[in-house]
Image: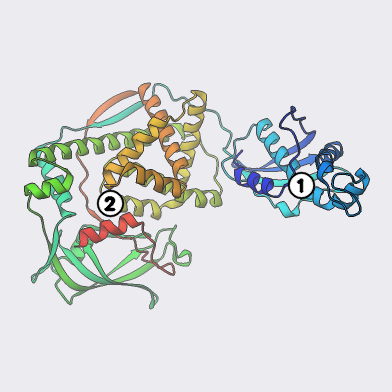
Amino acid sequence: MADDELKDDLEDTSSVAVDGSEEEEVPLNLEVQVASPSACERRVTVTISRDDIERYFDDAFSEMMPTAAVPGFRAGRAPRKVVENRFRDEVADQVKSSLLLASLEQISEEQRFTAIGEPDFDLEAVEVPKEGPMTFEFTIEVRPEFEMPQWKGLKLRRPMCDFTDADIDEHLENMLARYGQLVPHEGEAREGDYLSVNITSTHDGKQLIRENDTVLQIRPTLSFVDAELEGFSKLMEGVKEGDRRSAEVTLTDDALNEELSGQKVSLEFEVLEVKKLKLPELTPEFLQDLGGFDSEQDMREAIRTQLERQLEYRQQQLARGQISALLTKSADWELPKGLLQRQGARELERAIMELRRSGFSEAEIRARENQLRQNSLASTASALKEHFILERIAEERELDVEDADYDKEIFLIAAQSGESPRRVRAQLEKRGLMDVLRNQIIERKVLELVQSEAKFENEPYRPDKTDTEAISIAAGGAGESIPVSTEETDEAETEAN
């Protein structure tokens, strides 16, 4: 049961522990009733017998007696009845905490549901009665119960590609763009050029956002956190300094500005400057700074390796999508909106982490991040259903994570970000993302297992061209722009210089 935080609270409120460390602890005589408001919720009502309550009081007072300080008596010499009367209220709080902690531990061992969240529990509302049994309730989110689908022998498609010199040239140009310099351009703008613009969005004449001096590359699609502007390159074709262009976008149903979700907002772009990107020369000094390369050929081989890693990611994602569709075909259980909202941020972190370890650029990651934000509830529901099934397979096959698995994942993320593995690990631990990394590793192991039992049909694959410019701005507004990570900010500044 995922009740570690509640256990900490209970342990903190109990300064006198109920002794059970040296003797085998006697189980509580619990009456547990479990209701199922939905597939992913359990309402648990627990009744603790009076005999257990008195036993815990007796143990607590027995431990207190040798050191109890009562006026008129030497420490530890006061009669038990006097100690019980004087410290009854204090001990009652300690007994309550001990009983609740023991109850939760026992329920977690005896109940068949698997918790996926913390118990919704009001500690202050629980009281130890002077007479009769003690009763308390809590609600907890659980993994739904379901019959396992057949996962052996699935028929899957697998993309295959032999990368050409032209593929490497294109990837090299995109990589060098991160180190290029934006220089002013007096003529009209074309697709691939850069613009410095002021962005304003309005709805019914009311201004929602105003973003000044934002640098954008002209690409077919402009992706906001909560909307997509298709035809952005056509809209900006031929613009020059001082021009204005207008467009409309429809906000997603998951827009941060809930009042305007699903509605249209107007956008205006004021062009401040047109810029072109000047790529750096591949001098020996630059090759060393870029990645310790001794020659351009060494760098091209590294790019080929990176493309192969990205192909592996595409293969895994396509296989994962097919496996997920087949395994979740009968997963018709409804997931609570609150659960999806809470898990959405963690699913987003998992997806970003997977992209980083696969060698994608920050621009590509931002585009994918915006897509996930725009369809947050739907994508999270799909990911959770998939996770529940993969988790069951992992449990049945006793798959677990080793230290070497963590080391490998962190090394790959570090290689893409340019930071040391030690720093990446520290960041993950500080942000509480090690369990997200663990789930990612477990899921990958299960997917590898499923694929080892599958039948594949190869199909041709070509690398995706980056046709989306993604920005961390909500077109519908949300009080303030969406905060971006330090890594994203640094990357954006690098690309803009």
Amino acid found under the numbered disc labelled 1: Gln
Crowdedness near tag 2: few (<14), some (14–19) or many (≥20) residues, C-alpha within 10 Å = many
Residue identified by numbered label 2: 362
- Residue on which the image places disc 1: 94
Question: Is label 1 in a helix, a strand or a loop?
Answer: helix
Residue 312 as seen in the image, left or right of residue 226: left
- Position of the C terminus, as image quadrant, is bottom left
Mark 1 or mark 2, which has the lower sequence index? Answer: 1
Judged by depth in the image, the label closer to the viewer, 1 or 2, is: 1
Categorize mark 1 by other alpha carbons within 10 Å: few (<14), some (14-19), many (20+).
Answer: many
In the image, residue 169 lies at what x, y percent?
10, 44
Q: Position of residue 58 (x, y in %)?
A: 85, 39
* Residue 272 vertical position relative to residue 31 in the rendered view, above or below: below
Horizontal side of 308 relative to 410 (left or right) equals left
Front residue (pair 212, 428): 428
Instruction: Kindly identify the residue that appears in the image at 68 percent across and 45 percent down.
Output: 11
- Is residue 107 left or right of 81 when viewed as pictured? left
Q: According to the image, what is the colour scheme of the structure? A: rainbow
- Is 124 above or below relative to 312? below
